[in-house]
Amino acid sequence: MIIHTKSDIIPSEITPKEVFDNRRDFIQKSGFGLIAGAAAVISNPLSAATLSAIAGTAEGNGKPVGHANTSAIIKPFGPHQKIVGYSKTSYGTGEKLTAYDDVTSYNNYYEFGTDKSEPAINSKLFKPHPWTVSIEGEVKKNKTISIEDIYKLAPLEERIYRMRCVEGWSMVIPWIGLPLSQLIKWAEPNSNAKYVEFISLADPQQMPGQNIQVLDWPYIEGLRMDEAMNPLTIMAVGLYGEQLPNQNGAPMRLVTPWKYGFKGAKAIVKIRFTEKMPLTSWMKAGPNEYGFYANVNPQVEHPRWTQSSEKRIGAGLFAGRIKTQMFNGYTEQVGQMYAGLDLRKNF
Amino acid sequence: MLRFLTTIPNKKQMVWIKSFVFFVCLIPLIRLVLLGLQGSLTANPVEFIERSTGFWTLFILLATLCLTPIRLIFGRAWQIQLRRMLGLFMFFYACLHLTCYVWLDFSFDWAGVTKDIAKHPRILVGFAAFVLTIPLAITSNNAMMKRLRQRWKQLHQLVYFIAVLGVVHFWWLVKKDIREPLLYACILALLLGIRIYYKKVAIPKKSNPAKASG
């Protein structure tokens, strides 16, 4: 699938230096004997450009893998390992990125503790590899896929997205991931599938926060099928050029930038296609506060937090608040999906 | 171990105790300033300062409410002399808390603040608690005490209500993990419970035989 964003950059504008550096880094780490894995059939012109940059110097190591649109190279798995061979996109140009340290130290991830500083500490021993995701529900047939194969399912892209938390703060994060639509195509849902349910890992041994019934574990989130297929929706596997840190949802998490942050289910182990709207963890915990859609909407107030404005993380002590935008500023891409829907009722 | 409670400090010792408590009460502020200078107020410094000043407001308030139960249980009253200072420190941290909210959080956007107070019960309750603290702070000096006499005591019983509002304000802040506010609610219930017990059960019992003999 080709992603047409409004201001597609032309291949010559892609920063070749970074790609080049990444390639070097990878070759050093993997050694020459290992398979670098490179391009086969490329449908995305952006990644085509990126990959030709790689292939140009890594000849001999390149080997087509199957017939899939392959690009990402992710060996070895581990903390701070760089992802090589993702393409840049024009999303989020002009936004100032939130510092890496802030993105990775200020997390709402109750599986590792309810304080925002806890996930970074309590997730240190978490093992995101090996990892398999099972696909079930309204599908042609149930199947499983490894995280390695998910990396290869589609060319990985960098998407710089705003993230707005329901608590009234926001960040700008350079995610790396693949469009969820690619994973869904592979999953082959049948015609009964109206919704997608995302189920996170339940393992109190690895996730100490689950020893307390703050939420009904496992964490469950969901999307309507058209929301899941929207080009903005991605399965993120990395950020800031490296594999997703544990505290950010390793090895794979959902990112829907026009919705409040809690929609982004982390450490997903199961994707279930359903006919009925899934009951998400937060809907169960507070039905009057958290709806299924959870679209960023400055007009619909939350009982606890101001939703008309937000604090941008990293802006400084005296920066004040910025206005929250409808659909977090992504109305053009997602607005049409909610035409005719009363967003006050369906919050 | 509790001997310090049963020996009554003399005037000089009391000055030392008060100076010590005064310094201890400044530690949370000093800590915030030092963390601020180091730039280690977390990714969300405004929230951190709000949380910290809010926590210390509630903590000092509960500490203030401990003094009477200590008198009731141990029969010693010298610690009551610390009550005014603790109460004023509670007011001091409440002021910092509100200043942080109005200035750092909302940059003096009064329309935004008004809307926030009106739309969110949590903020309304906190704001009400603060407003009720103001008359207590104003009437905390000896002159006002003398002037108001019996009504001073009635007025300052507002502190129980303020404490309840404070705990509710914190309870409504947390999304789901209520352990911490629950702890403060329990402490407050205990502190108020002791008062009620002595008022309704313990003291009437003592005075009953006196009544019978008289």
Image (cartoon, rainbow, N blue to C red):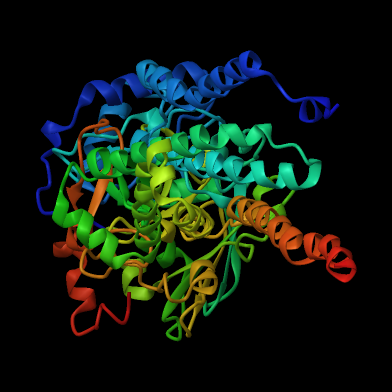
* Quadrant in which the C terminus of chain A appears: bottom left
Judge whether residue A207 can be spotted in this image. no
Above or below, A337 against A179 in this view is below
User: Is residue A32 rendered to the left or right of residue A289?
Assistant: right
The one nearer the camera, A41 or B47, is B47
Residue located 14% across and 37% down the image = A11
Judge whether residue A327 can be spotted in this image. yes
* Quadrant in which the N terminus of chain A appears: bottom left
Q: Position of residue B36 (x, y in %)?
A: 37, 22
Residue located 48% across and 85% down the image = A276
Q: Position of residue A162 (x, y in %)?
A: 26, 48
Q: Position of residue A334 (x, y in %)?
A: 21, 67
The one nearer the camera, A54 or B67, is B67
The part of the image, by quadrant, that contains residue A306 is bottom left
Above or below, A278 against B8 in this view is below
User: Is residue B185 rendered to the left or right of residue A102?
Assistant: right
The one nearer the camera, B85 or B23, is B85
